[in-house]
Amino acid sequence: MLDDLAIRVRQNIGLATAVVLFCALYLVYNLAHPRGFSSAVLVQNSDEIFALAMLAMAQTVPVLMSGLDLSVGAVMTMVGCFASYLLTGTAGGTPIHLEIFGLHLNLGTFPGGIEGILLGMAVCVAIGTLAGFINGCIVVYGRIQPIIATLATGAVYVGIALFLRPTPGGKIDDDLNWAMTNSLGDFASTVHIFNDGAAPWFAPLAWIPVPFALLVLIALLVWVPFRRSVLGRSVYAVGSAEGAAYMSGLPIERAKIAAFALGGFFAGCGGLFLAIQTSSGNADIPQAGAYTLNSIASVVIGGTSLLGGSGSAIGSIFGAMILRVISFLFRIFDIAPLLQPLFEGLILLAAVSIGALGVLRVKNTLELFR
Amino acid sequence: MSGISKRYAGVRALEGVDFACERGNIHAVLGENGAGKSTLIKIIAGVVQPDTGGMRLGGSDVRFATPSAANAAGVVCVFQELSLLPDLSVADNISIASPPRRFGLIDARAQRRRAEALLAGIGCEDVNPLMRVRDLPLSRRQMVEIAKALGQRPQLLILDEATSALTSADVEKIYAVLARLKAEGVAILYISHRMHEVEALADRASVFRNGRHVETFDKGVRSTADIVQLMIGRDIAAQYPPKPAPRSAKPVLTLENLSWEKRLERISLRVGAGEIVGLGGLDGQGQKSLLLALFGVLRGVTGRVTVEDREVRPGSPAAAKSAGIALVPEDRKTEGLMLPMSISDNLAIASLDAISTGPFVDRAKERAAVERGIARLQIKIGAPGDAVSTLSGGNQQKVVLAKWLMTGPRIILLNDPTRGIDVGTKQELYRLMRELADQGAAILFYSTDYDELIGCCDRVAIMYDGRIVRELEGAELTETNIIASALNIDAATAPHAASGSAHA
């Protein structure tokens, strides 16, 4: 039994390191913050973490398969631009018309009200998933390496976003913005459930930030089942040894497409939340690029091997949180913002080096190359 | 199956082969590398499609488009190249094709129980199913591979060199499992280059040569010499080259009290010029670590290594190379060769200094050196620019050896160089080893095959638990003595235990 535990810890040493590092950094942050350990600070932090955490999960799935997805930031941006049209919550619904190549197409009216908002959110997530699915199909049927396929589709998705929102704009329903970016208590009182959030059993949960609850929910309801499914295991298998996975009769092509589609789903969730949080759509190309690179950094800090086959999306969430807490610490200690990229880079190097410390203990140098 | 033909890019791999095997029967398939055995198996297992011909399984025509279709029909193959996923656990690997599920998700606990049961069935209880395959030694991985195959309830089980990495004790366990399966009516195709295994196991044997099915015969009809001749189609004078009379040679390599971690314990050994010294014993007693330590791969080695009166302390393979040491590594596919690179690139890679002018590789010198290497070892190739992965296993191993010979080594370390290599190439390698020794090289040769050690070596050091327990020489060098020392028992007091024991 103790053996089993030792084996599990040894095999997840990257994840364990990330969890410990995050806890230490976040403790320092809260101790230094004048209103540390309060729900308000937690809510603010969760809002800032959510989108990157989603993109980190989105990046994890292709990386496990030993591919990189350079389009996650672009998918997020594109979905955000769609959301700024579909989630306005206008009572009479939103008319949708398209002007392209001099044609004026009237595509009817997107419903308004609460049904419209729910439908709009579903459509946004579906668009993200579809974008990932297309990536997967290009990789599998076009036989193109993931990094180059997603570089191309990423440009296409940013192009669509720019077409939708040449300048930042659009609108998100105010109640939706309020409900999604505050605590569970605020959420309940906005959507009028649990006696407007005053139900006695609900009181101990009311402080939890909505984005944090969503993150836990998505991890538990999407990632955990995926990891325990045959498709999920096939993704790990392909990243570990594709030839052996094929010879074992695994559904390799389906696994690859599923990996990218799931990545698109997570990126879509991130884009949806970012639009709700900022109450607008913005085809911000530098932002898309920065999110993509940060997602890769999060994956690595979270203990997932870029060679594929080992790691998990849970680790990547911690990786994303570590990256964000580092920037929180900058605010709290009032360091010149211009120095932030420099320090972020150094800290990223340090964090990744901790994971690589095991190299020093290796007595058989041949093992370094396996 | 009947009338099977297959061509790869115009090269004939199989030509009009008719072949059959029956239930409850162990059928050996013999032939040199490149004889068409692997292609035959790949067709049966659905990895490649035949150009012509058809297959019948249990009375109905079948055609497998993928390995999973073959698995579904009860055809399961343990391939020569391991098909395990290194980053997944043993339990995951064993149940990879059809894991036990609960509510549509993989049931980790049931999967673990299943792995434990299957591993116990082949006497491999020492492997924890939670371990990653990456962290297991080669012999354990091969046992996991066999457990995985058995878990698929095969009707036709194909073992392609499945015992080549196993220890003697494991081979015995596999024999017992195969006997049980045979009694249950499973048809077994058995491919091995170890003749005594074939003799011990097979009920029938088929010989292939140059893509053709030469002959099928029942056990005992043909002698070993007959079979070998059928396989290579030419006479073999003697299996091993003659040994020179013992002489006192100047030691080239001297080890004193070499220790590393808990795996090597105060090893002292001398290898003289012109001497072939074998490393014997059960698998995993430190033989491989010893070779790696000498080649500068291990950190924290203590003790003295002297090469021709000069103390050396190689800290890396590069340093070992400049001290005149060469190593033919255990796994030629990952440590020996860069498979996608050309034969010529692979041959020149260890001796680039010698063929360069300033910082640039001299193409003319490279070509000349490569041609010499190919000619010296008679490597069968299409063109030097072809990827080394297109060669058969035996020829790949020749490339590894030729690469090191081009550095002009004084000390040659060989880590099981004949694993998975056909009889003809093996004999060429034995001859070459003796030639190199006669030219003054000191050779340290680890093999899991005791026949080979007895046939090739002037002296054999038997290792047990990281120590050299005995050195056998001359008339002492017998199978009984090797096995007794390998088990660390005194041959004089326990001859019975030894004689009945493993024969690997």
Image (tube, coloured by chain):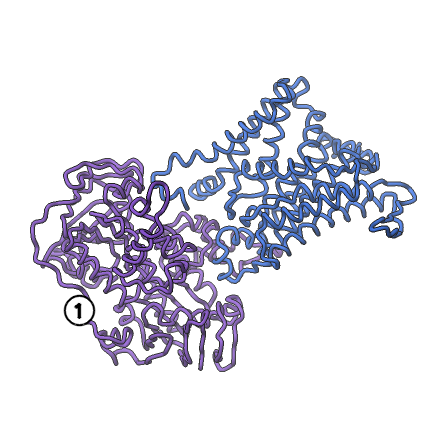
Chain colours: A blue, B purple
Res. A121 visible in picture: yes
Please state the horizontal and vertical placement of residue B217, each as a whole percent of the image: 31, 81
Q: Quadrant of the C terminus of chain B?
A: bottom left
Q: In this view, does B247 lie to the left or right of A14?
A: left
Res. B166 visible in picture: no
> For the residue labelled by badge 1, is the local secondary structure a helix, a strand or a loop?
loop
Chain under numbered label 1: B
Please state the horizontal and vertical placement of residue B398, each as a whole percent of the image: 30, 59
Q: Is residue B439 above or below residue B426?
A: above
Q: In this view, does B28 lie above or below A208?
A: below
Residue visible at 40% across and 47% down in the picture: B135
Front residue (pair A317, A31) = A317
Write down the residue under mark 1. Answer: B238
Q: Is residue B207 above or below residue A193?
A: below
Residue visible at 19% across and 55% down in the picture: B436
Q: What residue type is labelled 1?
A: Ala
